[in-house]
């Protein structure tokens, strides 16, 4: 089971806090008219919702549904964050056999999007798992815990718009958890693929995260512990282009975004995306876009002016 949540709409948070349960207390049986998110931090919590039992430990996340009764099964020490909330567009769904592959495909398509476009908002739905177990030391879990602390702080301060901040933190936490699930699925899927597939995926992740830094064949060999030429052949076989061709595409895409959305000089844009030499940056930019950076900059300014003209 999972939930489709419209990420363009903020959740309405009623309560957000941290609970500490001690024996002999047992979570009472109840059905409430709102969703409840539990994020475990310590101990164990034994819960049953409808016909499903959950044995929750540190790092576990579960979303309780207002359509079902839930209750504690036994007493135990535990600590967890909880959020009671409503959402205007959240829908319960049943997973099918293709669900995991659809999630991985969405991840792949997202990485190829133009991040300076409004088009990405056409697919704003967060696919949130009913239950997920994260490592308590993982970056995602630590970030989610930090978001919960900030949401609690905002809810307590009660300054104007404090509930908006709570909703923002909750939506961010929900999205981070959903992303973590896709990452887990992708990793599990890659285990059944050839080792070359896994290696190429590692290179893709590295290039997308480090494109703005100096990257050489020697550095890639050191990073991945294998011969660059061999790795480059594997990469081209799977992606249809060489490692450095892919790297150039990433850099030019980010350069286009910077020129379209900032007033940075061409040389500064080039350095920001990994080109130290301005002339070489201009040459590569023209190869991939068909125009020089200075021309593209003027075109972007004109497009923005046309968009903001009164109609």
Image (spheres, rainbow, N blue to C red):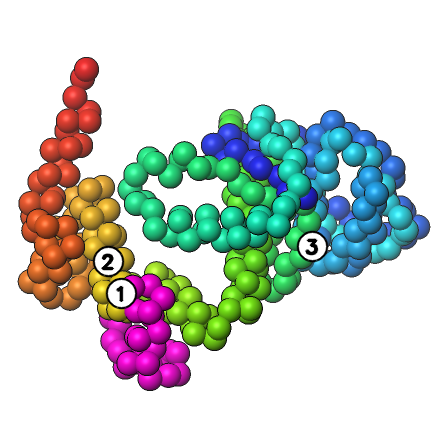
Look at mark 2 in the image and give the residue it sits on.
Answer: 249
Look at mark 1 in the image and give the residue it sits on.
Answer: 241
Q: Residue at x 46, y 70 (%)?
A: 198
Q: Are marks 1 and 2 in contact (CB under 8 Å)?
A: yes
Return the disc, 1 or 3, that comes first in the chain's sequence. Answer: 3
Q: Is residue 8 visible?
A: yes
Is disc 3 surrounded by few (<14), some (14 to 19) or many (20+) residues within 10 Å?
Answer: many
Q: Which residues are magenta?
A: 214-241
Dot 1 falls on a residue whose secondary structure is loop
* Camera-nearest label, 2 or 3: 2
Would you place residue 117 above or below residue 250 in this image? above
In the rendered structure, does residue 94 fall within the stretch colored magenta? no
Would you place residue 249 above or below residue 88 in this image? below
Residue 284, how many percent across, how many down? Answer: 13, 60
Return the disc, 2 or 3, that comes first in the chain's sequence. Answer: 3
Q: Is residue 81 visible?
A: no
Residue 38, how many percent across, how many down? Answer: 70, 45
Q: Quadrant of residue 93?
A: top right
Query: Which quadrant is the N terminus positioned in?
Result: top right
Query: Which quadrant is the C terminus positioned in?
Result: top left
Q: Quadrant of residue 235?
A: bottom left
Q: Residue at x 6, y 62 (%)?
A: 279
């Amino acid at each position: 089971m999972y939930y489709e949540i419209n990420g363009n709409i903020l959740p309405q948070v009623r309560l957000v806090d941290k609970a500490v349960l001690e024996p002999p207390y047992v979570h009472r049986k109840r059905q409430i008219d709102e969703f409840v998110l539990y994020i475990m931090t310590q101990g164990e919590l034994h819960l049953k919702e409808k016909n499903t039992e959950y044995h929750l430990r540190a790092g576990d996340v579960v979303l309780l549904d207002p359509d079902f009764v839930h209750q504690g099964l036994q007493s135990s020490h535990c600590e967890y964050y909880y959020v009671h909330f409503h959402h205007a567009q959240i829908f319960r769904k049943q997973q099918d056999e293709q669900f995991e592959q659809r999630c991985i495909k969405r991840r792949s398509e997202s990485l190829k999007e133009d991040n300076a476009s409004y088009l990405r908002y056409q697919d704003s739905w967060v696919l949130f798992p009913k239950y997920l177990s994260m490592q308590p030391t993982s970056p995602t879990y630590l970030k989610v815990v930090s978001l919960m602390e900030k949401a609690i702080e905002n809810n307590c301060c009660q300054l104007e718009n404090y509930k908006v901040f709570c909703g923002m933190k909750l939506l961010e936490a929900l999205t981070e958890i959903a992303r973590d699930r896709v990452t887990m699925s992708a990793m599990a899927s890659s285990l059944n693929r050839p080792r070359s597939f896994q290696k190429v995926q590692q290179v893709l992740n590295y290039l997308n995260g480090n494109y703005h830094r100096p990257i050489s064949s020697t550095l890639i060999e050191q990073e991945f512990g294998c011969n660059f030429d061999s790795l480059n052949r594997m990469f081209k076989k799977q992606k249809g282009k060489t490692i450095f061709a892919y790297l150039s595409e990433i850099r030019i895409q980010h350069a286009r975004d910077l020129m379209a959305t900032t007033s940075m000089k061409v040389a500064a844009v080039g350095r920001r995306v990994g080109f130290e030499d301005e002339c070489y940056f201009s040459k590569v930019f023209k190869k991939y876009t068909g125009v020089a950076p200075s021309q593209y900059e003027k075109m972007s300014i004109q497009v923005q002016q046309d968009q903001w003209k009164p109609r």
